[in-house]
Image (tube, rainbow, N blue to C red):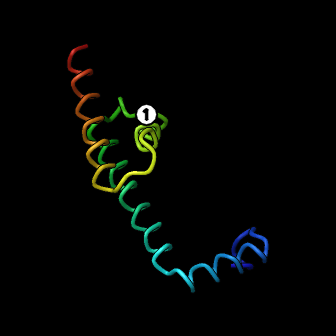
Amino acid sequence: MLNNTGWAKVDIENDINRYISWPAQANAYMLGMLEIRRLRDFAEQELADNFDLSDFHDRVLENGSMTLPMTEKAILSWVANKQSEARMR
């Protein structure tokens, strides 16, 4: 990590120690990242030119900490609403 990132050595050591003592945390971060990326890809495909990354991020974050299924439900609802709005124009 020292050779491949701009992180300070102490930050790298802290991360490594955290991952050793709490391996599920890194796993949870990765699963969350992959799910949010999947939802973003879905929204981009469904909304095409009507997709707004800032708006997507607002939808992901607006309710605070949520489970991944709750986040998926929120994004699916947002996409459906955006599609309805587009059809009404």
Residue at figure coordinates x 41%, y 44% from the top left: 60
Residue sticking out furthest to the top: 89
Residue assigned mark 1: 52
Q: Quadrant of the N terminus?
A: bottom right
Q: Position of residue 29 (x, y in %)?
A: 47, 66
Residue sticking out furthest to the bottom: 20
Q: Position of residue 27 (x, y in %)?
A: 44, 74
Q: Residues within 10 Å of mark 1 (few under 14, many from 20)?
A: few
Q: Nearer the viewer, residue 86 or 71?
A: 71
Specify the quadrant of the image occupied by residue 49: top left
- 64 sits left or right of 86 in the view: right
- Residue 27 lies, with reference to residue 65, above or below; the image says below
- Residue 23 lies, with reference to residue 49, above or below; the image says below
Q: Quadrant of the C terminus?
A: top left
Residue at figure coordinates x 61%, y 79% from the top left: 18
Q: Nearer the viewer, residue 87 or 34?
A: 34
Q: How many marks?
A: 1
- 21 sits left or right of 77 in the view: right
Residue at figure coordinates x 23%, y 33% from the top left: 80
- Residue 39 lies, with reference to residue 43, above or below; the image says below
Q: Position of residue 15 (x, y in %)?
A: 64, 76
**Secondary structure beneath label 1:** loop
Specify the quadrant of the image occupied by residue 6: bottom right
The amino acid type, in three-letter code, at marker 1 is Asp
